[in-house]
Image (tube, rainbow, N blue to C red):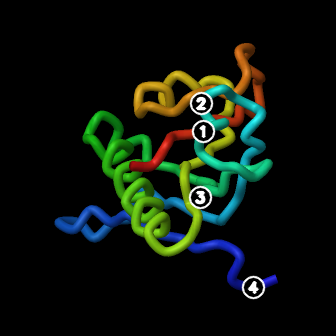
């Protein structure tokens, strides 16, 4: 299939090097999976943007690029919310990345942390 995701590259302009990327697709989460989701939709699911893939070059760690990438994605989601029913950002964090996404305001759907798949969401403004 074509055109089911979009990819953005983040480039450090002085050296013109790719320092990160993010791939987004439309998705949804059942509003019954977390108390905070219940008020976002009258339907069974809350629509959102799924961060399908996201990575940052380790050489650029602690430079604020991760925060910039999350802000960029949140801005896309917010713009979409004005045109279509996009209410949340969704990510399925790998075990050790759960705490990183929590620092950005994402909420875990389940209490226990799985080694491979931890669905999380961030409400868009």
- Residue at x 44%, y 57% (from the top left corner): 73
- Residue at x 76%, y 32% (from the top left corner): 33
Discs 4, 3 touching: Cβ within 8 Å: no
Image spot of residue 43 (x, y percent): 75, 52
110 vs 89: above or below: above
| Foreground of the two, 102 or 46 | 46
| Chain-order first, disc 4 or disc 3 | 4
| Chain-order first, disc 4 or disc 1 | 4
Discs 4, 1 touching: Cβ within 8 Å: no
Crowd class of label 2 (few under 14; some 14 to 19; many from 20; radius 10 Å): few
Residue extending farthest front: 42
Residue underneath mark 3:
49
- Mark 2 against mark 4, which lies toward the viewer? 2
- Mark 3 against mark 2, which lies toward the viewer? 2
- Mark 2 against mark 1, which lies toward the viewer? 1
Residue underneath mark 1:
39
- Mark 4 against mark 3, which lies toward the viewer? 3
99 vs 76: above or below: above
Q: Is residue 19 visible?
A: no
CA separation in Å, label 2 and label 1: 7 Å
Residue 2 tag number: 4
Residue underneath mark 2:
36
Is label 1 in a helix, a strand or a loop?
helix
Crowd class of label 3 (few under 14; some 14 to 19; many from 20; radius 10 Å): many
Is label 2 in a helix, a strand or a loop?
helix
């Amino acid at each position: 299939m074509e055109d089911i995701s979009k990819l953005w590259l983040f480039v450090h302009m002085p050296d013109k090097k790719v320092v990160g990327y993010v791939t987004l697709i439309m998705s949804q989460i059942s509003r019954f999976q977390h108390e905070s989701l219940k008020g976002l939709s009258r339907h069974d699911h809350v629509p959102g943007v799924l961060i399908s893939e996201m990575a940052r070059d380790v050489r650029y760690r602690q430079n604020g690029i991760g925060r910039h990438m999350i802000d960029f994605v949140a801005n896309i989601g917010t713009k979409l919310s004005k045109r279509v029913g996009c209410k949340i950002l969704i990510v399925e964090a790998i075990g050790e990345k759960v705490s990183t996404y929590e620092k950005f305001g994402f909420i875990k759907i389940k209490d226990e942390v799985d080694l491979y798949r931890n669905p999380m969401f961030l409400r868009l403004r």
